[in-house]
Amino acid sequence: MKATHKDWILFNGRMINTKEEQPMVALEERGFQFGDGIYEVFRLYDGKPHLLDLHLERFFNSMAEIKLIPPFTKEELVEELYQMIEKNQFQEDGNVYLQISRGTQPRNHVYESDLQPTYFANLVSFPRPVASMEAGIKVTVEEDIRWKFCHIKSLNLLPNIMIKNKINEQGYQEAI
């Protein structure tokens, strides 16, 4: 089961065809330098968003928790996401990855109050793992080494990466 990225993405309010243009992020972008941002992933079934309201509620709550002021309303973002799905003529199963970071400024742990956030969304074709759903997968239980704010979908996924690689080496597909 291979995930396939689709051509049209949303980048700072623009629809961009990645076959024609590659968006760039500045080296001093806070998401790139510090992981100063959040993300959300939601499923599409037959091209239709699944539980979109709940995912966007968490997305907006996470932004509020880290005091990141979005450059869009929920309604504007929903419209942009549907435009991206339509531009890609997407009618299958997949995921939308949505990310926002605080913006660009000279490197400093203290962020400026007037930054323009950077955000993007992309669409990935990702079929349902029917065989795994029917047969089950091998799981293990691991200590949660993430921070105490794990309800915020932070860009800093180093603890997740460390656990995922550890269990992969042990032959597991997921940790609980």
Image (cartoon, helix red, strand yellow):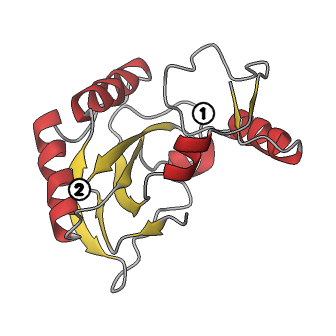
| Coordinates of residue 62 in the picture (x, y in percent) | 40, 24
164 relative position to 105: left or right: right
132 relative position to 24: left or right: right
Q: Secondary structure at mark 1?
A: loop
Instruction: Return the residue nearer the eye: 63 or 8.
Output: 8
- The quadrant of the image that shows the C terminus is top right
In primary-sequence order, the first of circles 2 and 1 is 2
Q: Amino acid at mark 2?
A: Gly
Q: Secondary structure at mark 2?
A: loop
Q: Which residue is mark 1?
A: 109
Q: Amino acid at mark 1?
A: His
Q: Which residue is mark 2?
A: 47
The tag on residue 94 is none
| Coordinates of residue 84 in the picture (x, y in percent) | 21, 61
Res 116 visible: no
**Residue located at (35% from left, 30% from top):** 59
Instruction: Return the residue nearer the eye: 11 or 131.
Output: 131
| Coordinates of residue 18 in the picture (x, y in percent) | 36, 77
